[in-house]
Image (cartoon, rainbow, N blue to C red):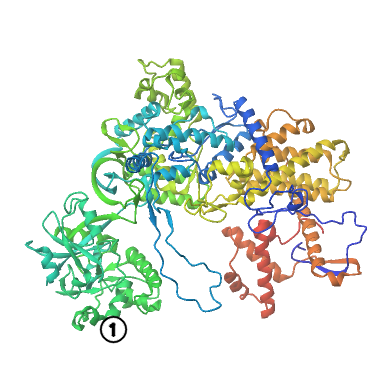
Amino acid sequence: GHPTHSTHFRHTSTPPTTDPNPRSPKRQRVDRLPGDDDEHPGEDGDDDKEDMPKGEAKSGGAPKGTGRRDKLVGIETKVQKLWEDGRKNEPAVDEKKSTGKFFCTFPYPYMNGKLHLGHAFTLCKAEFAARYQRLLGKKVLFPFGFHCTGMPIAACAEKLQKEVAQYGNPPIFPVEEEEVAPPPKEEPKGKGKGKKKKGKAAKKKSKRKYQWQIMEEMGVPKEIISKFCDASHWLEYFPPIGIEDLKKLGVMVDWRRSFITTDANPYYDAFVRWQFNRLLAAKKIEKAKRVCVFSPSNGQPCADHDRAEGEGVGPQEYTLIKIKILEIPEAVKKVCGEEKGDVFLAAATLRPETMYGQTNCWILPSGEYSIVKLNNGDLFVVSARSALNMSFQELCGTPNKPTILGTVKGSDLLGIAIEAPLCKYEKVYTMPLLTISMFKGTGVVTSVPSDAPADYAAWMDMKKDAAMRKKYGITEDMVKFDIVPIIDTPLEGANSEQRKLPAAYLCTKLKIKNQHAVDKLETAKKECYKISNAKGTMLVGDCKGKGVMEAKEEVKQMLIKQGKAVTYFEPQEKVVARAGNEECVCALTEQWFLKYGEKKWQGEVAKHIESTLNCFNAKAKGMFTFCIGWLQQWACSRTAGLGTKLPWDTDFLIESLSDSTIYMAYYTIAHFLQGGDLSGNPSSSGIKPEDLTDEVFNFVFAEPKNPVALPTNSNIPKETLEAMRKEFLFWYPLDLRVSGKDLIQNHLTMSLYNHAAIWNGNPDMWPRSFFTNGHVQLNNTKMSKSTGNFLTLEDAVKKFGADACRLALAEAGDGLEDSNFSEDTADKAILRLTTMDEWVEEQIASEKSLRTGDMDSFFDKAFDNEINTIVHEAKRAYDEMRFRDSTINAFYNLISSRDWYREYAPNGMHLNLVKKFIRTFAVLLSPICPHFCESLWTKASGFLGVSGMVVDARWPEVPVSDKVLTAKTDYIRTVSSNIRSTLSRNKKKSEGKKVLQLTISKELPAWKKFILKSLKDSYEAKGELLDNKTLSDSMKKTDLFKNKRMSKNAMSYAAMLQKEFSTRGAKALQTDLLFDE
């Protein structure tokens, strides 16, 4: 039989009162974490509320009474001092690598403020991994630096300077009056009762956010805020605070190796200069004119880390089609004045090959259009935004100063005759389209109703709607043109004629009635463009018979050569610079670029990603592969901000992503250079910055296979140089880097490129694994300073203590999707941990009363086996960076097993199993809650017979779990649970009864076997269960389900199995038991 599927209960009684264990266990083994929807019972089997000291809140934020939290904080403070005094986080190299090594890092955070919960969420992945690897006996290095390169700090300092200059020190900011709302209409009686009506205008603070106010919100004392007008003060103030907050969280960082970036740290500055000299020598850098996203006010490219909005957005290339105005309207003539020559509507398109199908041109009637003079003399009608972009691309005027003759309304441009390049018709007309955005493209849109569903819908509306035509001065003759077939697009289900007019076919198929069906039109557009680009064939023009993708470039070049089009760029999406808070443009700039698009370089990185790099997630690996497909030349220099100057061109600074790609190597020797000082300390280290020549770095960081001779003229002692090299060779390559998924598209991929360039031809020196996660929410809501749903790391640790925070961070999630930090979970962790602490003290005190002798009862064996199972499952979860699952096993499941054993063990728990449980609990949970486990280990050392510290302990070596015993244990749990639930549902029927009869079947019915086998086969083949539709279809192919009732029962049974699978995994799909019931 099957414990959950074929065991049936018929009630003839209640359990006898003589049952030695009348109470049911309060805890069950869990495969998901409590905390989102349900209550957490306490570890001693009673409800949380009963265990909560008077005055403590049951849930939701920090407890009202803080006794338990303060107890944990006291433990944390004491343990952190023990670690620091014992220098537990300062590993020494083992040249033989006899115990193995593990080197992990987290991208150094930007120091324009305090660390917050988002930082903690990701860096704790590295922290958990580091502590786990140490339990495996490895030497572990987890260093931590602080990033200061780029524009944000400089921009904030500049804002403060302006505010102090304008408003004083301390500043007195202007206040504004809130607009007085018009008096409300009289409410009908009975409605709006109790609502307050506004009276006089209220004075309030300006809605504008001043930098001074931001500093106050960060907790910076008012009397020192003016010091932040100097950008260097940010570098002195925030990094030490970051260190202090991280120490309180209990991270096992080797602080000797910490540093800040920029030339404020001459040691790291020398390292970055060496790196770029190497890149230049390898011909990975060139000076050229390239288009990039650009900040007009800063006068330099705006890279991802310089942006307040639009990270990952790059330039989008368009072809501007020059649509000649045949009959120039008076409004346009008036603006052009004495300017002679043709006037063109410039339409931006991504599909120049479709220009053969134009029937008209769309204009926004309410739009304001600029008439600009290009540098070649042409007159274009475009949006003001696109004119600004053109000015930065040497098309129109000079940067930030386009040559604008004047403006006209879109309504002045409607119904005019135009000549469209490649169009079948000699002349067509401009038409109104109300959905045009003046912030995308040029505000002028070509119309190709054969292949663009939106154009087709709007064109048909214009043909049918006489009232609309009359409103905008469009005559019937202007819409007489037939749609022109231009591309054979093999859409699914379309016949040979429909394939020639894919837009019309899709609009009919999707039942799109007009241009207002925006969502359906977007679906149609994506389908049409996808199939057309991949499989479409040209039907007209010089490229007739060629594929669309081939024709696209050929037609574009032909139009440009004929003077009928120009190339134009703008950001793919809106990009806003942090500095100045302004929208960015695309600019043609001459500067230094990293040549990430180089084929050989790209191929090496692609091979490493595919064959070696562990991404822990197939989707993440796909994101890396996609990134190297589009990442091309990268503007790596800037003219403003903080950073390191290019060694060969000191007019430029190295930008903030480019100086941050191989600094993991710097960590390996940083403690020789920094001397414990973030900016470096020559007097302590004995090494001066000028001693760090390229020859020194070449020697230290040379590949093992290609060593370099010791520099002969170095001021650094030979012994020190050799020690530095030994450190590098011991720790490299990097074993793990943990980051948010947003860095895949830049920093992480660039790190692979730069490792491949510096350690060329030796992939053994390139990173081994990258773990990436999604963002973290706070209480299921996006973290936001503006809404107040925000926690700094400092505040979180103050509120809950370090270990409760760490436990909640571990429980938050591990995938690429957004995770959730629950304050309720952190709050309840305080109770759980302190309750466990009390229980351990009770066991130590009652050692003599605990059972000894043989451990031969079923429950002894079951509990021992469950501990072994949990050890193996927790290890697998830690290995795979699934820290939520690690927590489930090391904390919840282990405690649940203990509670069940305590409840049912004859004559009480066995002393040896209690010891094994405490020992296992302290070690397994120590990566997550190290302070608590360290305290527990020390407290129980005499009881357990252990010595030293848990940070130096080893992962338990236990036998492989007994699958049969595990199945028996699960069976007992399941049957007893079913008995309880059945009794609970049938209280009246069971009154007065004395016998409980269990009926079990020896074999599952054929129809249940079919359902089980179908689900099991699907899981084994695809890793997932069949969906209900596929299962239903397969049921119809057999005669086991003779009527609707049987089919309905079968689907209910399948639903039950699916639910069980979500908690029990593959065990829920067993068709046979491993033992006799």
* Crowd around label 1: few <14 · some 14–19 · many ≥20 (10 Å): few
Front one among 1043 and 943: 943
Secondary structure of residue under mark 1:
helix
Q: Residue at x 36, y 27 (%)?
A: 270
Residue at left 83%, top 36%? 845
Q: Is residue 911 above or below residue 1052?
A: above
Q: Residue furthest front?
A: 200
From what the image shows, is residue 1060 above or below residue 521? above
Horizontal side of residue 34 vs 380, given as left or right: right
Q: Position of residue 918 (x, y in %)?
A: 75, 39
Q: Nearer the viewer, residue 72 or 274?
A: 72
| Residue 677 place in picture, x, y as percent | 46, 26
Three-letter amino acid code at disc 1? Lys
Q: Is residue 15 visible in the rendered structure shown here?
A: yes
Q: In this image, 900 relative to 672: left or right?
A: right
Q: Percent position (x, y) of residue 802?
A: 61, 40
Q: What residue does disc 1 label?
A: 464
**Quadrant into which the C terminus falls:** bottom right
- The percent position of residue 709, horizontal first and vertical second, equals 38, 19
Q: Residue at x 67, y 35 (%)?
A: 74
Res. 607 in view: no
> Quarter holding the N terminus?
bottom right
As rendered, which of 627 and 747 lies closer to the eye? 747
What residue sits 85% from the left and 48% below the top?
905
